[in-house]
Image (cartoon, rainbow, N blue to C red):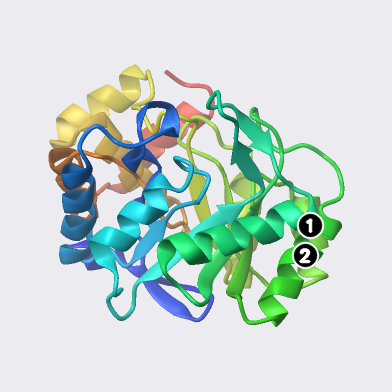
């Protein structure tokens, strides 16, 4: 099913552009175990059965919980599955999100991902920087150099960056190739428009993420009206817009519900006309 959304090359892998984000497999607040572990395992297996071959995760989800569930559900992993993870944060005992950008912390994060996923080498590791409210200016070379060293040691195939500025991306590229960029982006939050187009020219994947709690339909009358007219939900419509926005955008909507997963996967069959795209583009231009 996800093949209908098209494919893109992520590192040396061809992935379906409609993937799956595993953050919601952990407990409330992305902390602790899920209420229903069997359901979480079923969601992962259903995603793979319907053509998902790109899973986004991190060992600080839980922490450790999400990766352990992925391993239980899918290991040994099917051929062609690309698992993308990230480092740069840790969880406090109170469920707080703490920066973890020192070399020892980044190295530990990579090894935690390897151990809990049951892998000898990670497909893609993103360096997560910036703050809660978005990217923060400042050098990232020391942190990216740490990951580049781990890549040279054979622990990582490809590197990416998350929550970054265009300047920071260029800084990382001067150290090692960047396979993907993960930033906050959606119909209404379009600060990265120019960046997405530039990355597309370079053949670099752009993976929009959403604030903690997952993607919720934008409070927009235009979005609701368009969704009703085309027979889709507001979330499906907003995700379909992202697929149309640029060929290098990869989607990682997440859920712990089988019904919601199937709804997300059906986005591959949602068609948006040029007139509808124009209407939706107006939301990002300050429309309602």
Asked if labels 1 and 2 touch by Cβ distance under 8 angstroms, the answer is yes
Query: Dot 1, how many residues are within 10 Å of its Cα: few (below 14), some (14-19), or many (20+)?
Result: some
Q: Residue 262 carries which label?
A: none
Report x, y in % for residue 60: 53, 45
Task: Identify which residue is drawn at 40% across, 77% down.
Answer: 14
Q: Distance between the residues labelled 2 and 1?
A: 6 Å
Task: Determine if residue 247 is in view.
Answer: no
Task: Identify which residue is drawn at 50% across, 81% down.
Answer: 12
Tell me the SS state at disc 2. Answer: helix
- Quick one: label 2 or label 1, which is nearer the N terminus? 1
Q: In this view, does 141 lie to the left or right of 70?
A: right
* Quadrant in which residue 16 is drawn: bottom left
Task: Reply above or below: 47 against 270.
Answer: below
Tell me the SS state at disc 1. Answer: helix
Q: Name the residue under label 2.
A: 146
Report x, y in % for residue 179: 60, 69
Q: Mark 1 points at which residue?
A: 103
| The one of 12 and 255 positioned closer to us in this rendering | 255
């Amino acid at each position: 099913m996800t093949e209908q959304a098209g494919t893109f090359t992520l590192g040396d892998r061809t992935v379906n552009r409609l993937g799956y984000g595993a953050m919601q497999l952990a407990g409330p607040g992305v902390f602790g175990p899920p209420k229903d572990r069997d359901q979480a395992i079923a969601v992962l297996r259903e995603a793979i059965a319907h053509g998902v071959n790109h899973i986004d995760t991190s060992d600080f989800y839980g922490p450790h919980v999400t990766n352990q569930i992925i391993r239980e559900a899918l290991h040994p992993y099917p051929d062609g599955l690309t698992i993308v993870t990230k480092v740069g944060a840790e969880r406090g005992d109170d469920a707080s999100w703490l920066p973890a950008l020192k070399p020892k912390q980044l190295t530990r994060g990579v090894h935690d991902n390897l151990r809990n996923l049951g892998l000898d080498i990670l497909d893609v590791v993103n360096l997560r920087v910036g703050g809660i409210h978005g990217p923060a200016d400042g050098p990232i070379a020391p942190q990216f150099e740490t990951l580049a060293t781990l890549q040279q040691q054979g622990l990582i195939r490809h590197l990416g960056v998350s929550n970054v500025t265009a300047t920071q991306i260029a800084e990382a590229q001067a150290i090692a190739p960047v396979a993907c960029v993960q930033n906050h982006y959606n119909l209404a939050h379009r600060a990265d428009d120019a960046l997405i187009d530039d990355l597309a020219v370079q053949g670099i994947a752009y993976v929009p993420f959403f604030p903690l709690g997952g993607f919720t339909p934008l409070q927009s009358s235009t979005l609701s009206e368009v969704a009703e007219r085309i027979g889709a939900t507001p979330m499906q419509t907003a995700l379909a817009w992202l697929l149309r926005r640029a060929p290098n955008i990869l989607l990682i909507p997440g859920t712990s519900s089988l019904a919601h997963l199937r709804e997300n996967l059906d986005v591959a069959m949602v068609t948006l006309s040029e007139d509808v795209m124009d209407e939706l583009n107006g939301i990002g231009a300050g429309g309602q």
